[in-house]
Image: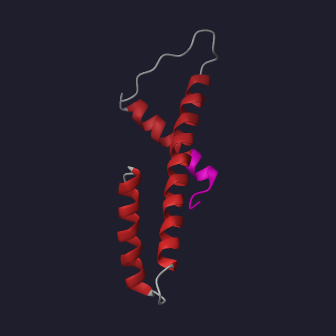
Amino acid sequence: MRLTDDKVRRIAERLHDELAQKGLLEYREPARVRAGTGRAARVKAVFDFIIEDLRLEEEIDAEVDKVLATYSRDLKGTERDILFRKHKEEIARKRGYIL
């Protein structure tokens, strides 16, 4: 994974806090729950979503690498980058994944 769990956690916290500050989140704290516990659960949900999205993108990247490995000649530099992007967009579209 390109990002460590700690970095993803900080991104999730910041995303949650900025959306809440701008009034773009609406939620109710569950009854009989300590203050802040709801925030932790919401941040965890954002964290889990980001991790799952990164995992799906890694799967797509691995599939693209398999496709590029089937080419009869070695791909280098810009040519590989262009073909990687093209195949990644195609595979992502087939899976319904938005890049």
For residue 99, say whether it is visible: no
Residue 96 is situated, as x and y percent measured from the top left of the image, at 38, 49
**Residue 6 on the magenta segment:** yes
Left or right: 5 in relation to 24: right
> Which residue ends up furthest to the bottom in the rendered image?
73
Q: Nearer the viewer, residue 41 or 85?
A: 85
> Which residue ends up furthest to the top in the rendered image?
31
Residue 8 is situated, as x and y percent measured from the top left of the image, at 56, 49
Q: Is residue 36 above or below residue 18?
A: above
User: Which image quarter: residue 62?
Assistant: bottom right
Q: Is residue 83 above or below residue 33?
A: below
Q: State the quadrant of the N terminus.
A: bottom right
Residue 20 is situated, as x and y percent measured from the top left of the image, at 42, 30
For residue 49, say whether it is visible: yes
Which residues lie in the magenta part? 1-9
Residue ID at (50%, 79%): 70
Q: Nearer the viewer, residue 46 or 97?
A: 97
Q: How many marks?
A: 0
**Residue 29 on the magenta segment:** no
Left or right: 98 in relation to 14: left
Residue ID at (47%, 90%): 73
Q: Is residue 84 above or below residue 22?
A: below
Left or right: 98 in relation to 35: left
Q: Nearer the viewer, residue 70 or 15?
A: 70
Residue ID at (57%, 41%): 48
